């Protein structure tokens, strides 16, 4: 089971966890990347995320690739399916809003932690979504332009 998406609405880690929970899974790990009030020593007022038109498909491809890499038989228990849910916000976000939410379920905790960490890193590295930061001093900075895409 793999779910991916982009949304201009609030994301919920509870929704993500509920989507991946399974009686066959021994571990569920979640991640919520939230908008913080500072970056590089400057006060941040708000953010905006912009996605390339191909971002939804690339996000889906990343999730499927990571799921395939972490889907392997458990010698003691047979195969436990990897379950992944991930969504990234687009549009305007406020301080404290979740920008990226992921949840994974696997047979064991080590596998779940490793999968979730790799998933977040690959989404940030490969999916063409760019962040525009608005600072309290009136300056604006684009982050990720020229990467992931």
Image (cartoon, rainbow, N blue to C red):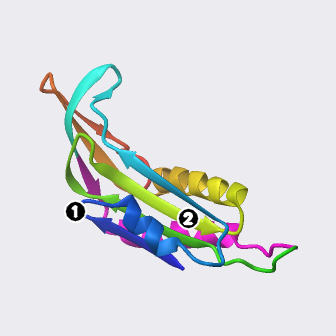
Magenta stretch in the rendered image: 48-75
Where residue 80 appears, x then y in whole percent? 71, 77
Q: Which disc is residue 70 wearing? A: none
The residue depicted at 49 percent of the width and 50 percent of the height is 125
The residue depicted at 38 percent of the width and 44 percent of the height is 144
Mark 1, residue position? 8
Real-space Cα separation, disc 2 to disc 1, in angstroms:
22 Å
The residue depicted at 35 percent of the width and 23 percent of the height is 40
Where residue 98 appears, x then y in whole percent? 32, 51
Query: Observer-nearest residue: 5 or 24?
Result: 24
The residue depicted at 68 percent of the width and 58 percent of the height is 109
Task: Check residue 10 for magenta coloring.
Answer: no
Compared to residue 127, the image places residue 39 above or below, namely: above
Mark 2, residue position? 104
Where residue 114 appears, x then y in whole percent? 66, 54
Q: Residue furthest top?
A: 41
SS state under label 1 = loop
Where residue 70 appears, x then y in whole percent? 69, 67
Query: Earlier along the polypeptide chain: callout 2 or callout 1?
Result: 1
């Amino acid at each position: 089971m793999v779910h991916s998406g982009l949304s201009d609405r609030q994301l919920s880690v509870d929704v993500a966890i509920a989507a991946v929970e399974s009686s066959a899974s021994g571990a569920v790990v979640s991640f919520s990347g939230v908008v913080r009030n500072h970056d590089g020593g400057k006060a941040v007022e708000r953010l905006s995320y912009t996605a390339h038109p191909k971002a939804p498909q690339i996000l889906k491809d990343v999730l499927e690739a990571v799921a395939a890499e972490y889907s392997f038989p458990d010698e003691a228990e047979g195969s436990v399916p990897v379950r992944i849910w991930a969504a990234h916000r687009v549009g305007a976000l406020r301080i404290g809003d979740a920008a990226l939410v992921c949840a994974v379920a696997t047979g064991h905790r080590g596998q779940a932690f490793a999968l979730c960490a790799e998933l977040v890193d690959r989404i940030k590295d490969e999916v063409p979504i760019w962040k525009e930061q608005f600072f309290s001093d009136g300056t604006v900075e684009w982050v990720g332009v020229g990467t992931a895409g």
